Image (cartoon, rainbow, N blue to C red):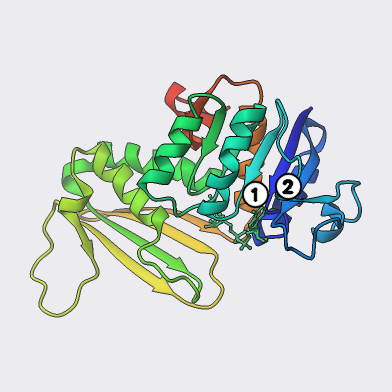
Amino acid sequence: MVEIGIMGVGGRMGRMLVQAVQAAGKSCRLVAASERADSPLIGQDAGEVAGIGAIGVPILSDTGRLFATGRVVIDFTRPEVTLAQLPKAVALGSLLVIGTTGFDAGGRGKIAEAGQQIPIVMAPNFSVGVNLMMRVVADVARVLEESFDIEIIEAHHRHKVDAPSGTALGLGRAVAQAIGRELHEVAVYGREGITGERERQTIGFATVRGGDIVGDHTVLFAGEGERLEVTHRASSRMTFAKGAVRAAIWLAGRKAGLYDMADVLNFDRGGSE
Ligand code: NAD
């Protein structure tokens, strides 16, 4: 039974994570949860806050004992929060699943350093489907390489402020790497006016924004007389929460290191666990 702690339990992802830990059944158990020191949620039951009823886990302030030896703490907060808490995780021998995004190079460096002392899984997208898609599109690109044009189309809700999505860029990198191209040299971000004919080497990106779309990604391989499309659609944040809990269970008992979802899904050994 893996003991789990959740940092930022009152957030959109935090609440989902409580539900995902509960749904994982006997393999893991929520034992601690935290929020920022001035949160009105301090002292409330984490299960009540997540809408699943009391589970006997009162929400601690960020100065409380969230970290403990052997406990896996899942973090979906903000980069500065993760980095401030990191030394405590190392000092107490906790394991970490980091879903927080937006670290700069310095922040990533600190996480890599911590990874030399404790086991950490970090991923910008914890959806099992998206991580599987990264692998699938790389395989497809290797086979179709020269004779198909590659385009990446993504759609997100109207509140998203950046484009293309980090996941679309990740898919672009996976495809480009697989066929020996540098994404920054071949990427085309949107087209308008007299663009001229498409150059075979390019990888095009198209962005859709609207409504409450959680996140759709398609990699299109277009050839003469046929086309192949690989599509992933996220319809709920629960997909990220379930992936993070899967990563937490996988991480328990590992040796120190900085791992990603490809490790969790056993991609490097050619299959899924
Ligand atoms: P959110 O703002 O809803 O939640 C963050 C929570 O952290 C808030 O409740 C906040 O009060 C809490 N918090 C702030 N300071 C804290 C502290 N010192 N100690 C404990 N808790 C503290 O945000 P969200 O939508 O849940 O997203 C959180 C992060 O997860 C973002 O970086 C987002 O980009 C990322 N995210 C990653 C994935 C993925 O698959 N990797 C998926 C979704 C979101």
Quote the CA–CA distance across marks 1 and 2: 6 Å
Residue 217: mark in rendering: none
* Residue 176 x, y percent position in the rendering: 25, 44
For disc 2, does the CB lie below 8 Å from ligand 1?
no
For this view, does 208 lie left or right of residue 76? Answer: left
Quarter where residue 175 is shown = top left
Residue 232 appears in the picture as rendered: yes
Q: Which residue is mark 2?
A: 20
In this view of the protein, which residue sits in the foreground, 264 or 42?
42
Q: Residue at x 73, y 41 (%)?
A: 66
In this view of the protein, which residue sits in the foreground, 175 or 6?
6
> Which residue lies most toward the bottom here?
193
Relative to residue 87, is residue 69 depicted above or below? above
Residue 241: mark in rendering: 1
**Comes first in the chain, label 1 or label 2:** 2
Q: Quadrant of ligand 1?
A: bottom right
Q: Are marks 1 and 2 in contact (CB under 8 Å)?
A: yes
Residue 202 appears in the picture as rendered: no
Dot 1 amino acid type: Ala
Classify 10 Å Cα crowding around label 1: few (below 14), some (14-19), many (20 and above). Answer: many
